[in-house]
Image (spheres, rainbow, N blue to C red):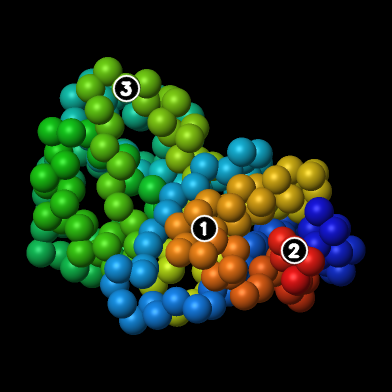
Amino acid sequence: MKAVQAARTGMKKRNFSQSFELILNVKGLDVSKPEKRFTEQIELPNGLVESRRKICVIATGDTALRASKTDGVDRVLGRDEVESLVGNKKEAKRLASGYDHFLVDTPVMGSAARALGAALGSRGKRPVPITPGQDLGDLVRKYAKTVTMQLRKTTQLSCIIGTEKMKDEDVAGNAEAVARRVADKLEKRFKNIGSIYIKTTMGSPVKVAMPGGK
């Protein structure tokens, strides 16, 4: 909470709504070893208000129709559209970069994997299956406030945790949820986290006091 308040205090007014970002620096892990790396999707308990994640649905039939009428869905791709991307690496990369989450209907999961698997994998993204009978609205609402933290070839992880229009306690709650989920993935939990910072889009990083007073 203190770090969020300090970051907000130091924030200069801009002509756009700035975001709050959480930065974690990991220590004591050899990230050159693939088994030490991970990609974790974390649902933020307090959401993101106007900065919800962008969602693309890949589906056919009734699921595609429902997706086109569901709030929070930014784009719907049918089977023909996604299959046209097979072998088109440039367009696949553009699409993979344009959306945060891809919700995929089970019948077209194979096509989506062939068309976008490499492009999504290189960005630490993975298709989210839409299972038969699943409430699409609930799934979209969940992933609209789900962020991704990746430990790959560098020891720094970061993600958005809120916006300046949110209450400080809501931003702090999101930050705590993300930090604890990342710590749970590490061998020695918080002992493997060297430092934590919170910053606004255009602001300077503010250091967070670590558990145990560090």
Q: Can you see residue 200?
A: no
- Disc 1 and disc 2 in contact, CB within 8 angstroms: no
Q: How many marks?
A: 3
Disc 1 residue crowd, few under 14, some 14–19, many 20+, Cα 10 Å: many
Q: Nearer the viewer, residue 205 or 141?
A: 205
Disc 3 residue crowd, few under 14, some 14–19, many 20+, Cα 10 Å: few
What amino acid type should be assigned to the residue bearing mark 2?
A: Gly
Q: Secondary structure at mark 1?
A: helix
What amino acid type should be assigned to the residue bearing mark 1?
A: Val
User: Of marks 1 and 3, which one's residue comes earlier in the chain?
Assistant: 3
Q: Nearer the viewer, residue 158 or 16?
A: 158
Q: Quadrant of the C terminus?
A: bottom right
Q: Secondary structure at mark 3?
A: loop
Give me the disc on residue 43. Answer: none
Q: Dot 3 corresponds to which residue? A: 134
**x and y percentages locating residue 142 in the rendered image:** 48, 35
Give me the residue at 18% from left, 25% from top. Answer: 61
The correct choice, above or below, for 134 with respect to 13 in the image is above
| The quarter of the displayed image where residue 204 is located | bottom right
Alpha carbon of mark 2 to alpha carbon of mark 3: how far? 43 Å
Left-right relation of 51 to 101: right
Q: Dot 2 corresponds to which residue? A: 212
Give me the residue at 58% from left, 43% from top. Answer: 44
Residue pushed farthest right?
Answer: 9
Give me the disc on residue 182. Answer: 1
Q: Nearer the viewer, mark 1 or mark 3?
A: 1
Q: Secondary structure at mark 2?
A: helix
Q: Nearer the viewer, mark 1 or mark 2?
A: 2
**x and y percentages locating residue 58 in the rendered image:** 25, 40
Disc 2 residue crowd, few under 14, some 14–19, many 20+, Cα 10 Å: few
Give me the residue at 30% from left, 42% from top. Answer: 128
